[in-house]
Image (cartoon, grey):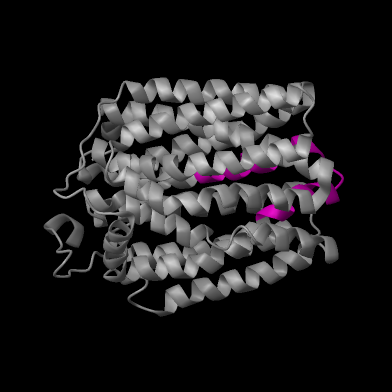
């Protein structure tokens, strides 16, 4: 099996093109409003921006997962693209009529977070429906390459648009990317959800997904531990604009920083498809790589030249791209089709639940101390979390566990 064979699947190829364009729009969106808000309002305002996004995102995730496991996933993703385009267009008109910049972008970030609560689990659950299970590693690898290529181009385009024009032009460009993504999704046929009973209420639906998660030690531990890992990672992300600024650099260097990280992730995703990690080694490799990411992030804040910082950014991207192929493939081949939307939502909730307060704490800590001190504290806790995953055998065993309620099949057992 090869990545070329996976790319040859027509519906998967269209899905990946749509995903790439959508991600490109999102990357331009985030880098442009992040830079404008951080420069206009400082670390605290930037913290408010990320908090607004997660406050819109988190409360809807569990409900969105239930929707994704009942309605055709292609349709959910398509509608999300259209709604996001409409929300951004409204924000552009508000700015044209001289609404306050930062409050408008905070509201926009909040609404975009709500829309992404539906689009992210829908697309995560849709990919395995479009490809043979034997090609999942290759398909997830190509998806990683496409998405990271988009994230690499996004910061360059976003910061260039800011340099030559303004935030309104950036947002208008985003509107067209989401409309184009929706048009491509329209050409993909709907895939029915393979389940008998769709009458359960929200509590019953989430309870079923939680019951499955509890039967899988690797999944339960991953969700629990990365509640804390992503909390500290978010504080590191808060510091990036100010890290760039501390070296006397501007928006273009900030864009280069993001582009180099995305280029590394693209390389890592490609390696994950060319040399898929065997299922029995996935957990060990995963935790080693994520520990390496934390150490790379610490070097970002060291008093070294910017070109040296970019080397560690590239390495962090390579490790991150590889481990995302591992995680997405395991979620694809070890989670039942009718549970994928809810389990992906639970995974997202676990990763993001503490993030609304992390940007605020990160912005406050950077203002109180400096970027290096904040990064040192964050990386210490991230490495501790990763070490737990390495030391406990059941946590690093990424094989599907059998239970009476959720029996294994020959494929997800191997």
| Residue 221 picture location, percent across and down | 40, 71
Residue 146 at x, y percent in the picture: 45, 34
Q: Residue at x 65, y 61 (%)?
A: 358
Which quarter of the rendering shows the N terminus? top left
Question: Quick one: 392 or 94, which is closer to the camera?
Answer: 94
Q: Is residue 133 above or below residue 397?
A: above
Classify residue 250 as left or right of residue 238.
right
Residue 311 versus residue 399: which sits nearer the camera?
A: 399
Q: Quadrant of residue 200?
A: bottom left
Depth check, front residue: 11 or 351: 351
30 versus 372 height, above or below:
above
Quadrant of residue 400 in the image?
bottom left
- What's the residue at 26%, 64% (across, down)? 212
Q: Does the magenta stretch include residue 244?
A: yes
Most extreme residue toward the right is: 248
**With 328 as the anchor, is 11 left or right in this view?**
left
Give the image quarter of residue 143: top left
Residue found at x 25% / y 39%: 129
Magenta span: chief secondary structure: helix
Q: Position of residue 343 (x, y in %)?
A: 34, 56
Which residue is more in the foreground, 156 or 77? Answer: 77
Q: Position of residue 284 (x, y in %)?
A: 39, 68
Magenta run includes residue 331? no
- State which region is magenta: 237-265
């Amino acid at each position: 099996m090869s990545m070329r064979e996976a790319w040859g699947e027509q519906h998967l190829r269209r899905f990946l093109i749509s995903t790439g364009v959508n991600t490109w729009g999102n990357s331009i969106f985030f880098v442009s409003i992040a830079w404008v808000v951080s420069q206009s309002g400082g670390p605290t305002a930037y913290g408010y921006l990320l908090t607004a996004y997660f406050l819109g995102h988190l409360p809807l995730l569990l409900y969105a997962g239930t929707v994704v496991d009942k309605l055709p996933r292609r349709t959910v993703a398509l509608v999300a693209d259209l709604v996001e385009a409409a929300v951004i267009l409204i924000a552009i008109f508000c700015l044209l009529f001289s609404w306050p910049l930062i409050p408008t972008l905070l509201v926009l970030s909040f609404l975009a977070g709500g829309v992404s609560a539906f689009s992210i689990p829908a697309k995560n659950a849709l990919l395995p429906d479009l490809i043979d299970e034997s090609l999942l590693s290759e398909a997830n690898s190509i998806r990683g390459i496409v998405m990271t290529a988009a994230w690499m181009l996004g910061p360059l385009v976003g910061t260039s648009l800011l340099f030559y024009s303004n935030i309104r032009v950036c947002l208008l460009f985003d509107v067209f990317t989401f409309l184009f993504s929706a048009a491509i999704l329209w050409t993909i046929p709907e895939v029915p959800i393979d389940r008998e009973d769709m009458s359960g209420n929200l509590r019953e639906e989430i309870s079923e997904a939680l019951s499955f998660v509890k039967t899988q030690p690797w999944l339960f531990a991953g969700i629990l531990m990365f509640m804390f890992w992503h909390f500290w990672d978010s504080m590191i992300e808060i510091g990036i604009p100010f890290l760039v600024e501390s070296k006397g650099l501007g928006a273009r260097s900030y864009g280069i920083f993001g582009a180099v990280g995305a280029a590394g992730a693209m390389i890592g995703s490609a390696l994950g498809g060319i040399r898929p990690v065997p299922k029995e080694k996935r957990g060990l490799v995963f935790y080693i790589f994520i520990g390496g990411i934390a150490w790379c992030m610490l070097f970002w804040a060291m008093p070294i030249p910017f070109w040296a910082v970019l080397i560690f950014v590239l390495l962090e991207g390579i490790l991150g791209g590889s481990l995302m192929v591992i995680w997405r493939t395991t979620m694809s081949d070890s989670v039942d089709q009718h549970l994928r939307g809810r389990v992906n939502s639970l995974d997202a909730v676990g990763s993001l639940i503490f993030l609304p307060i992390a940007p605020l704490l990160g912005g406050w800590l950077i203002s109180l101390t400096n970027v290096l001190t904040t990064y040192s504290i964050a990386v210490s806790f991230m490495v501790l979390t990763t070490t737990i995953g390495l030391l406990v055998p059941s946590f690093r065993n990424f094989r599907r566990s059998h239970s009476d309620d959720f029996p294994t099949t020959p494929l997800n057992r191997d």
